[in-house]
Image (tube, rainbow, N blue to C red):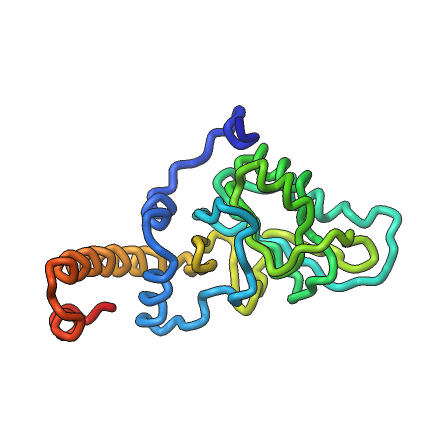
Amino acid sequence: KRVSEVGVTRPEDPDVARAAALPVAVLADVTDRLGHRSQVLDHGVRPLGQRAALAGRAFTVAAVASDEILERPYDREIEAVDATPAGAVVVLATGGVREAAVWGELLTTRMLARGGVGAVTDGGVRDVAAIRELDVPVFAAAITPRDSMGRLLVVSHGEPVECAGVAVAPGDLVRGDDDGVIVVPAGLVPAVLAAAEEKVELERTVRREMEAGASATDLYERYGVL
């Protein structure tokens, strides 16, 4: 069994369930159309393994570059993972520091035991083979065996952050797939989901008509989707 299957009850979140059925590309089209054009994380943030399907509410963690060797360098990192809410995606912002791993197997294991559903970072991760064995979606900007001690320091959790160029607040909707990761601000979720579901239905119609021989030119004129 995956760790997350043992003794964990996740809260029902209909919006997360709806988002899980929608491609990131469609959500990105919709947020663009609504004037929110900076919701997709930098393209360097990629899934570690074959399990790329990710949907949940953001639980934010912030780390900063630090060369100080502390006696207890991991205290706030441990506090953060121990506070992970059920159903959450850990969003760990490092300011783009990729020289050290801020995430690994044991943090993933604890996150799953808390009921978390995945992690996203603009920094580095390690223990990649073990994380893949856990069958959990983790997205990162880099893979490195270097420890964070004397390189990065977690300073807070549950506060707004900027991760890979995107502002993320606790409770925002995070959706990841093979195309990348998007963050939908909590207040926009109802409008974005409704418009994205409508677009998916239009795309299905266009696909069927393309398969039946209709031209892309005619279909775009009629439906305005591509």
| 81 left or right, relative to 200 | right
Q: Residue at x 51, y 38 (%)?
A: 86
Please tell me which residue lies in front, 145 or 39. Answer: 145
Q: Residue at x 47, y 58 (%)?
A: 181
Q: Position of residue 21 (x, y in %)?
A: 32, 48
Name the quadrant containing residue 98.
bottom right
Decide: is 148 above or below 8: below
Q: Residue at x 51, y 41 (%)?
A: 117
Q: Residue at x 69, y 58 (%)?
A: 63
| 193 left or right, relative to 42 | left
Please tell me which residue lies in front, 74 or 104. Answer: 104
Decide: is 125 above or below 122: above
Q: Position of residue 141 (x, y in %)?
A: 60, 60
Q: Position of residue 203 (x, y in %)?
A: 21, 60
| 60 left or right, relative to 183 | right
Decide: is 72 above or below 68: above
Decide: is 90 above or below 98: above
Quadrant, the C terminus: bottom left
